[in-house]
Image (tube, rainbow, N blue to C red):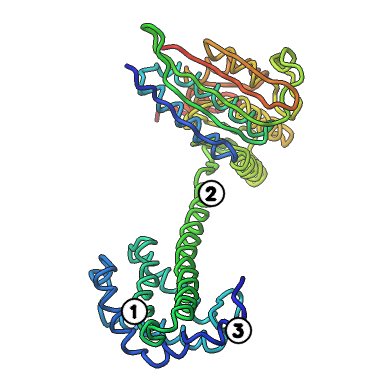
Amino acid sequence: MTTSPQNSADSRLPLVIEKNLDRILDTWISELQVDGGRLLNLIRESELREQASRFLDLLRKAIKVAGVNPEKTAAYDELRDLLDELSRSRSEQGFTPTETATFVFSLKRPLFRELKEAHGDNDTTALLDDIWQATMLLDRLGLNTTEVFINTREAIIQRQQQDLLELSTPVVSLWNGILALPVIGTLDSERTQTVMESLLQKIVATGSDIAIIDITGVPAVDTLVAQHLLKTVTAARLMGAECIISGIRPQIAQTIVHLGVELGNVTTKGTLADAFALALKKKRQKVQDI
Amino acid sequence: MSGNEHLQLSISTEPDVVYVRQAVRKLASEIGFSLIDQTKLVTAASELARNALIYGGGGMATIEKKQQGTRTGVCLTIQDQGPGIENIEKALEDGYSTGSGLGLGLGGARRLSNEFEVKSAPGEGTTVSITRWL
């Protein structure tokens, strides 16, 4: 940062805010009514006024203590917390990041007007300096709200990814000693890992000796998916369970042949029902009409 | 039809591979590929995109509709700036892999497409281009 301490000492910014707090607030609110778009449709004016006045108050205090550089100074923490909270609640209320940032940016005009008045016509250099610093400050605070907005979104995306991982790997017990694992969606390395783990654990927990892996819900089987499947089958076999792969659709069968993947001695069946019938046969049991 | 539909996607994470696959499937089904041909093309795209990611350290995929006389097809070009392939003949052999895969990806992609071209030299990255006709 190039802001030298001298600059902030000369700055009239703190004084201007201090002296004209109410007037700035009023103009800011009317500015928001014009600029803010849907702002007042979604928030009551009293609430908006309260937020704006808290913001101004904290800004005034922060500038007084730490000057106009918000980077890493504790004095700005409270202000930043307010913005975080504001940004989060705005995004929940359905505001766009632009609308949220505009809340901060629209303070510029009222603030600049006061600065201009305080400096008069003679002192253009100092005025420009002050305006520049105020701009920098508000820009950073405004961008801050966008960042919080993005972080909130990213947290949601991450949570959903985790949900997907968990959701898509249920191992179900079909019969005494027969497990089924319906795989749905794309099998990438991370998911296969989860799938394999939950299958092996369930094999131990239930003492099953046959596991049916159904891939009806897998859109495409490439060499990586095939490799993952083979590894799962081998691991299950090491634990004493035999695997049957079912749900290989015609187009998948053809692709596997073209790829040259050898499924070797893995038993495969067209449908889960066929695989289940085979599993029952292997266990020397059958389902009968009564 | 002169408007060449043409889509560029970057491949830098595993979800990008899935995205390439979905984009290829979308174009192929729009053009009218049968389910079997769609699956073949999608699988080939998956192999090549993953190769670019794993061996090439990421790259670009270009998916376009190709028109040649009365024929329509989908052309997919995958390009990476990785270490390149030392021996293309060998890389196309089944069961040969410098990594931990099955060694069937590149050869498999060739068998799954109608036209197949690899350009690569050590240190110069790899470009693989495949076309499948309707």
Residue depicted at x 74% and y 27%? B123
Tags 3 and 1 in contact by the CB under 8 Å rule?
Answer: no
Q: Secondary structure at mark 2?
A: helix
Question: Which residue shows up at 34% across the image and 75% down it?
Answer: A109
The tag earlier along the polypeptide, 3 or 1, is 3
The x and y percentages for residue A32 are 29, 73
User: What chain letter is assigned to the residue under label 2?
Assistant: A
Give how far across and how far down residue B88 sits, in percent: 71, 16
Q: Is residue A78 left or right of residue A2?
A: left
- Residue furthest out toward the front: A122
Label 2 belongs to which residue?
A: A166
Label 1 belongs to which residue?
Answer: A110
Choose top left, top right, bottom left or bottom right for residue A82: bottom left
B48 left or right of B67? right
First along the sequence among labels 2 and 1: 1
> How far apart are the two marked residues, 2 and 3, measured between alpha carbons?
57 Å
Amino acid type for the residue under numbered disc 3: Gln
User: Residue B58 occupies which quadrant of the picture?
Assistant: top right
- Which image quadrant: the N terminus of chain A? bottom right
Furthest toward the bottom, the residue is A19
Report, in whole angstroms, how far the alpha carbon at label 2 lies from the one at label 1. 52 Å
Q: Secondary structure at mark 3?
A: helix
Could you tell me which chain the residue with mark 3 belongs to?
A: A
How crowded pointer 3 is (Cα within 10 Å; few <14, some 14-19, many 20+) is rated as few
In this rendering, the answer to whether A90 lies above or below B10 is below
Q: Which residue is mark 3?
A: A6
Give the crowd class for mark 2: few <14, some 14-19, many >=20 residues within 10 Å: some
Asked if the residue at tag 3 contacts the one at tag 2, i.e. Cβ–Cβ closer than 8 Å, the answer is no
Q: Look at the image and tell me in which quarter the C terminus of chain A lies.
A: top left
Q: Position of residue A55 (x, y in %)?
A: 41, 81
